[in-house]
Amino acid sequence: MKISLGKKTLLYPAPVCVVGTYDHAGKPNVMTAAWAGICCSSPPCIAVSLRKATYTYGNIMERKAFTVSLPSEDYIHQADYFGMASGRDEDKFARTKLTAVKGEMVDAPFVKEFPLALECSLHSSVQIG
């Protein structure tokens, strides 16, 4: 039986995406992004929705680069923490004892222990809502 849930922002299953950036001083930072996904195949693009108030948003706007990493189940607690704490206030890599690795193609870090990392350059920014 099909039931309408009305107008809601739902998509299931949703992967856990961890966005990596460097701040103005070169400190690596990561955050868990609830809204991320493929938005184009040519050129290959990932869309990530972030509030302007986040530390990561400012880092991306300044550096024009970021990574999107997907953690394995072994690191779900660390990924959850990445979404609860702010890089303005603490070093998330030091706190979780995970390793920041400088991207080979962009000026952004990824998490060494996570099995997949996409290195991304900022293509465009759109304010919605």
Image (cartoon, grey):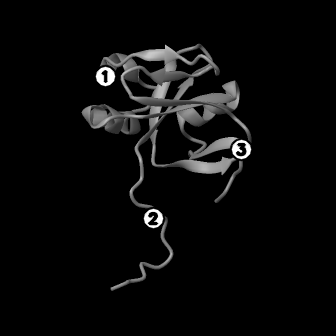
x and y percentages locating residue 67 in the rendered image: 55, 30
The front one of 78 and 58 is: 78
Report whether 10 appears left or right of 24.
left
Q: Which residue is mark 1?
A: 96
Labels 1 and 2: the sequence-earlier one: 2
Q: Are marks 3 and 2 in contact (CB under 8 Å)?
A: no
Considering the numbered disc 3 on the image, is that residue within a helix, a strand or a loop? loop
Residue at 63%, 51% (x, y): give it. 39
Above or below — where is 50 with respect to 13? Answer: above
1 or 2: mark nearer the eye? 2
Residue 34 location in percent, x, y? Answer: 45, 48
Disc 1 crowd rating (10 Å Cα; few below 14, some 14-19, many 20+) is some
Q: Which residue is mark 3?
A: 125
First in residue order: circle 3 vs circle 2: 2
Residue 10 numbered tag: 2
Pinpoint residue 80: horizontal percent, then vertical percent: 33, 39
Packing grade of label 3 (10 A; few <14, some 14-19, many >=20) is few
